[in-house]
Amino acid sequence: MKKRWIILFGIVIMIIFGLGIKFYMDEEKLNKEMINVVYSNEAKSVFENGLKSLDAKALTGKGVINTYEIDKKSIKQNPMGGINVTLIINKDLEWNVTYTLGKQNGKIDGGGASISKELTKKLELKGS
C-alpha cells in the first residue's frame, strides 16, 4: 500500500513540476512579445504623438520634454488588456509618463496615460 502512495505522490510532483515549467515558458514568450510591441516603430509613434499633445514643442529641444526613454522594467501586462509601460522624460526618474498601449482595429493605440506630479507641475509652469 505504501508503494502505491509513493508512486502516486511521485506522479503528482512530476505533473506539478511540468505545469510550472510550461507556465514559465509561456510567461517568457509573452514578455518577449510585449517588449517587441513596446519597442516597435508603431509604439514609438504613439509615444511621440502623446508627448507632443502634452507639450507642443516636445522633442524639439525648445520644450519641457526634450528626450524620453522606455523603462524596460516597467513593461507589464495590464489586467484589463494591453501593455503598461513607463517613459522616463529627460533622464529624470521623477519625470515620467505611464502609457497603456492597446490594439484598436489592428493598430497600436495609446489607451491612456498617467503623468507624474513633478512633470505636470513643470508643464503647467511652462504653459503659464
Image (cartoon, rainbow, N blue to C red):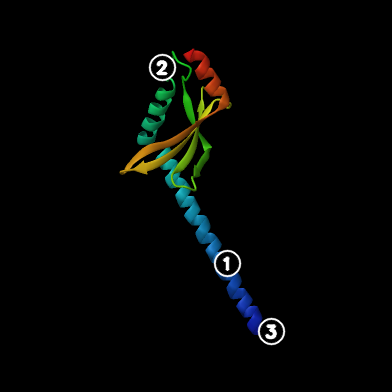
Instruction: Please state if 6 lies on the left or on the right of 101 as rendered.
Output: right
| Label 2 SS | loop
Disc 1: which residue: 16
Disc 2: which residue: 57
CA separation, marks 1 and 3? 21 Å
Q: Residue at x 55, y 28 (%)?
A: 116
| Label 3 SS | helix
Residue 33 appears in the figure: yes
Q: Confirm or deny contact between disc 1 and disc 2 (CB under 8 A).
A: no
Residue type beneath disc 2: Lys
Circle 3 crowding by C-alpha within 10 Å: few under 14, some 14–19, many from 20 = few
CA separation, marks 1 and 2? 55 Å
Disc 3: which residue: 2
| Label 1 SS | helix
**Whether residue 56 is situated above or below residue 20 in the rendered picture:** above
Q: Position of residue 103 (x, y in %)?
A: 36, 43
The mark lying in front, picked from 1 and 2, is 2
Residue 39 appears in the figure: no
